[in-house]
Image (cartoon, helix red, strand yellow):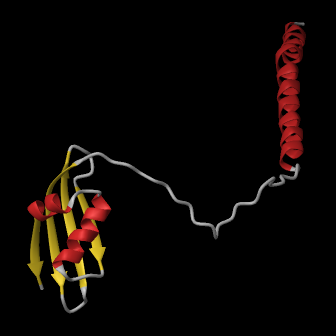
C-alpha cells in the first residue's frame, strides 16, 4: 500500500513538473528551428552595388607646429626623402618622398605639401646628401 502511494506520488510529480518542462523545451526547440529556417531561407538582394574600381578620397586637416625638417637627397636614385618633426598633435613625424634633387624644388614641394611659406621652410630645413 505504501509503495502504491509512493508510485502514485511519483507519477503525479512527473506529470506536474517533468511533462510541462519537456513540452516547453520541445516547443522552444521547434520554434527556434522554424524561426531559423524562415529567416535564413530568405533571399537578400543588394539594392545598390558597390564599385570597387572607383577610388575613394578623404580630406584630412591637421593642425600642428613644424619643429624641424630633415631632407636626405639621394643623387643616385634621384629622389629626396623628407622627414618633418611636429608638435601639438598626436602625429609626431611626417615622411615624404619626392622625385627631385634640387634644393629649390625640394623646398617648393614641401611648402606645397605643408601649406607653409618658402621662407619658413628654408629656416627649418636641414639637408643631407648621399
Could you say which is closer to the camera, residue 37 or residue 63?
63
User: Which quadrant does the N terminus fall into?
Assistant: top right
Q: Which residue is drawn at 27% across and 51% down?
A: 91
Q: Tell me how many marks there are.
A: 0
Q: In this view, does 104 lie above or below 7?
A: below
Q: In this view, does 40 lie above or below 121?
A: above
Q: In this view, does 73 lie above or below 124?
A: below
Could you say which is closer to the camera, residue 82 or residue 12?
82
Q: Which residue is drawn at 19% across and 85% down?
A: 74
Q: Residue at x 11, y 61 (%)?
A: 124
Instruction: List the single residue furthest toward the bottom.
Output: 76
Could you say which is closer to the camera, residue 101 or residue 49?
101
**Image quadrant in which you'd find residue 99:** bottom left
Q: Which residue is drawn at 86% across and 41% down?
A: 33
**Image quadrant in which you'd find residue 114:** bottom left
Image x and y of residue 96, in percent:
28, 69
User: Which quadrant does the C terminus fall into?
Assistant: bottom left
Left or right for 81, reference 55: left
Could you say which is closer to the camera, residue 67 or residue 100?
100
Q: Is residue 25 above or below residue 79?
A: above
Image x and y of residue 9, in percent:
86, 10
Image x and y of residue 21, in percent:
82, 22
**Image quadrant in which you'd find residue 69:** bottom left
Amino acid at each position: 500500500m505504501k509503495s502504491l502511494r509512493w508510485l502514485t506520488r511519483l507519477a503525479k510529480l512527473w506529470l506536474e513538473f517533468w511533462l510541462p518542462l519537456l513540452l516547453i523545451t520541445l516547443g522552444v526547440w521547434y520554434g527556434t528551428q522554424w524561426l531559423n529556417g524562415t529567416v535564413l531561407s530568405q533571399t537578400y538582394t543588394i539594392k545598390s552595388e558597390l564599385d570597387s574600381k572607383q577610388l575613394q578620397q578623404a580630406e584630412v586637416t591637421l593642425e600642428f607646429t613644424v619643429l624641424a625638417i630633415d631632407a636626405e637627397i639621394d643623387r643616385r636614385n634621384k629622389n629626396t626623402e623628407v622627414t618633418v618633426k611636429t608638435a601639438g598633435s598626436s602625429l609626431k613625424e611626417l615622411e615624404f618622398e619626392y622625385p627631385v634633387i634640387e634644393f629649390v624644388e625640394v623646398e617648393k614641394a614641401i611648402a606645397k605639401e605643408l601649406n607653409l611659406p618658402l621662407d619658413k621652410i628654408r629656416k627649418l630645413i636641414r639637408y643631407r646628401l648621399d
